[in-house]
Image (tube, rainbow, N blue to C red):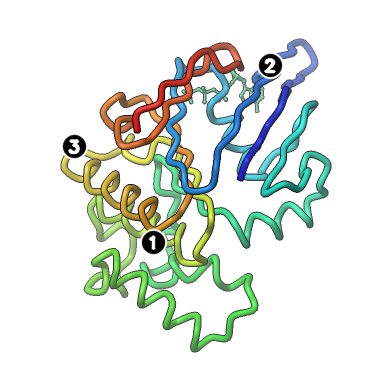
């Protein structure tokens, strides 16, 4: 599903040049659940941004389902993203002014789905995430665990083939954290490919494979299942 080869990302400011990704290469197959680990600053978030087509690269190749996307323009990237990728962030990134329902509906507004079908899809996902009773609440009225469940619901509502998660349990206690990891496991069992950045060895054990990074490169890979 994803094959990156000698990926390079350099951040430049007037006085400083930082090589965030330094000839990084790896492959993720359809249906895999991969954890990416490594010390602060090693380039994990940069990598997720590139994999999520949110940022461009300075060198190397990025094949997404066999198509070279390294040189895609913003428009093509955004199309590919909307159709294929769901994001889950550490800080939930919900919109406070929107209800649970409206937050989850958001990714569908940009698709061709008709309103009736859209509403049906959102309700199905809310049901699956056990959030129906919170449908008309605002994020601030929910616990952290519930907010992350809403964020996962939003990530999966357009049935993405790939979920990119950046420390999804970082702001949660262990009970809520485990619940979110169980959700990830279920989604993966249903066929969704998952790439998750985490600092938690505990969370990484839910994955099939751990990619460990250092200084913008892959240093080791451990296969767990
Ligand atoms: N927008 C930016 N401008 C300049 N340098 C940046 C920018 N974003 C990241 N960097 C630098 O690139 C390197 C990789 O950062 P990145 O955020 O990808 O690391 P990380 O592994 O995700 O760290 P953490 O675990 O702390 O989130 C770091 O040296 C960082 O300072």
The quadrant in which the N terminus is found is: top right
Note whether 118 is above or below 110 in the view shown: below
Left or right: 26 in relation to 183: right
Residue appearing at x 33%, y 34% in the figure: 170
The quadrant in which the C terminus is found is: top left
Residue appearing at x 42%, y 26% in the figure: 210
Q: Position of residue 112 (x, y in %)?
A: 64, 78
Dot 1, crowdedness within 10 Å: few (<14), some or many (≥20)?
many
Dot 3, crowdedness within 10 Å: few (<14), some or many (≥20)?
few
- Distance of label 1 from label 3 (alpha carbons): 20 Å
Q: In the figure, residue 96 lies in which quadrant?
A: bottom left
Note whether 2 is above or below 11 in the view shown: below
Note whether 187 is above or below 56 in the view shown: below
Which is more N-terminal, label 3 or label 1? 1
- Distance of label 1 from label 2 (alpha carbons): 34 Å
Q: Position of residue 66 (x, y in %)?
A: 72, 46
- Disc 1: which residue: 153
User: Residue reaching furthest left?
Assistant: 175
Q: Position of residue 14 (x, y in %)?
A: 80, 16
Residue appearing at x 35%, y 49% in the figure: 184
Which is more N-terminal, label 3 or label 2? 2
Note whether 22 is above or below 49 in the view shown: above
Q: Position of residue 111 (x, y in %)?
A: 63, 73
Left or right: 196 in relation to 84: left
Query: SS at mark 3?
Result: helix
- Disc 3: which residue: 174
Which is more N-terminal, label 2 or label 1? 2
- Distance of label 2 from label 3 (alpha carbons): 34 Å
């Amino acid at each position: 599903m994803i094959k990156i080869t000698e990926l390079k990302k350099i951040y430049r400011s007037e006085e400083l040049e930082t090589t965030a990704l330094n000839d990084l290469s790896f492959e993720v197959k359809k249906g895999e659940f991969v954890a990416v680990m490594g010390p602060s600053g090693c380039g994990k978030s940069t990598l997720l941004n590139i994999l999520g087509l949110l940022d461009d690269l300075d060198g190397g190749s990025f094949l997404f389902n066999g198509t070279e996307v390294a040189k895609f323009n913003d428009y093509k990237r955004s199309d590919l993203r909307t159709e294929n990728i769901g994001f889950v962030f550490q800080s939930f990134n919900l919109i406070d002014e929107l209800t649970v329902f409206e937050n989850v509906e958001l990714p569908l507004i940009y698709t061709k789905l008709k309103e009736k079908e859209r509403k049906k899809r959102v309700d199905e996902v809310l049901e699956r995430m056990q959030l129906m009773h919170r449908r008309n609440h605002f994020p601030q009225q929910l616990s952290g665990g519930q907010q992350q469940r809403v964020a996962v619901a939003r990530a999966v509502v357009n049935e993405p083939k790939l979920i990119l998660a950046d420390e999804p349990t970082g702001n949660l206690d262990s009970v809520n954290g485990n619940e979110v990891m169980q959700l990830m496991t279920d989604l993966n069992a249903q066929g969704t490919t998952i790439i998750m950045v985490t600092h938690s060895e505990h969370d990484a054990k839910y994955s099939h494979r751990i990619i460990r990074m250092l200084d913008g490169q892959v240093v080791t890979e451990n296969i767990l299942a």
